[in-house]
Amino acid sequence: GDSVTQMEGPVTLSEEAFLTINCTYTATGYPSLFWYVQYPGEGLQLLLKATKADDKGSNKGFEATYRKETTSFHLEKGSVQVSDSAVYFCGTGTASKLTFGTGTRLQVTL
Amino acid sequence: KAGVTQTPRYLIKTRGQQVTLSCSPISGHRSVSWYQQTPGQGLQFLFEYFSETQRNKGNFPGRFSGRQFSNSRSEMNVSTLELGDSALYLCASSLEDTSYEQYFGPGTRLTVT
């Protein structure tokens, strides 16, 4: 079955630092890839998505590019803010079944 | 438009009991999925319903079951609760039957003692 591997957390950064969270996947067919974010006490929210190879998803300053050759979908942001502190989940979806990574907790400090 | 709502938000049960959790999807959404979130296993897919039919099922024992009603509201049931069932149970709804863009509710925190 599908699987997603993302870098272990927690990741602690100072405000305005550069963020990379690595994510690789295995899946059959041509899956969509996405990043969801979970803020404390809340449910998951879709952060960005990509539906085919070389697509770049972007939202709120975050970006990720669908790399089929390396089966990766790394999340990046050029300058993180304290408000970005949350847990980030990489995942792959086909039909209505989503497979998530274990999540990476990001803590941004002043 | 109201988001996905889940009731109750918190629940404490004893081993061996059963529990029913409820999910109301966003109006117009016909697909409802359920996930279990634990610190050790992360987010794991339980099952997905579309138009009252279970279309996908994860690798959970038969103690976990669900259903969907004609108004798209969904319930999941766990029978003979075990300590390991303590988790945050998340419901998500989507507009189209093959949409990966799911909208999540806040979850029900189940504690089994």
Image (spheres, coloured by chain):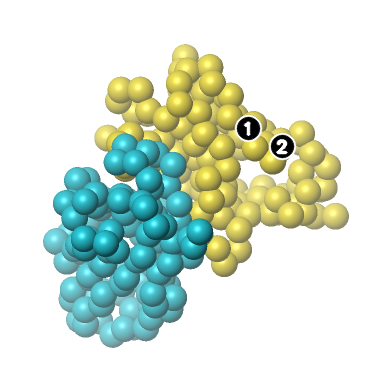
Question: Count the marks: how many?
Answer: 2
Question: Image point 63% across, 54% down: which residue?
Answer: A86
Q: Is residue A54 above or below residue A20?
A: above
Check whether the beta carbons of the residues at disc 1 and disc 2 lie within 8 A of each other: yes
Q: Quadrant of residue A41?
A: bottom right
- Seen in the picture, residue A75 relative to B5 is either above or below; the reply is above
Mark 2 residue type: Gly
- Residue A58 disc label: 1
| Residue nearest the observer in this picture, A12 or B44 | B44
Q: What chain is the yellow one?
A: A
Q: Where in the figure is residue B2, as x and y percent of width and height?
A: 49, 62
- Point out which mark residue A28 bears: none
Q: Position of residue B112 (x, y in %)?
A: 33, 79
Disc 2: which residue: A61
Q: Which part of the image, by quadrant, shows the C terminus of chain B?
A: bottom left
| Tag 1 subunit | A
Q: Position of residue A51 (x, y in %)?
A: 45, 26
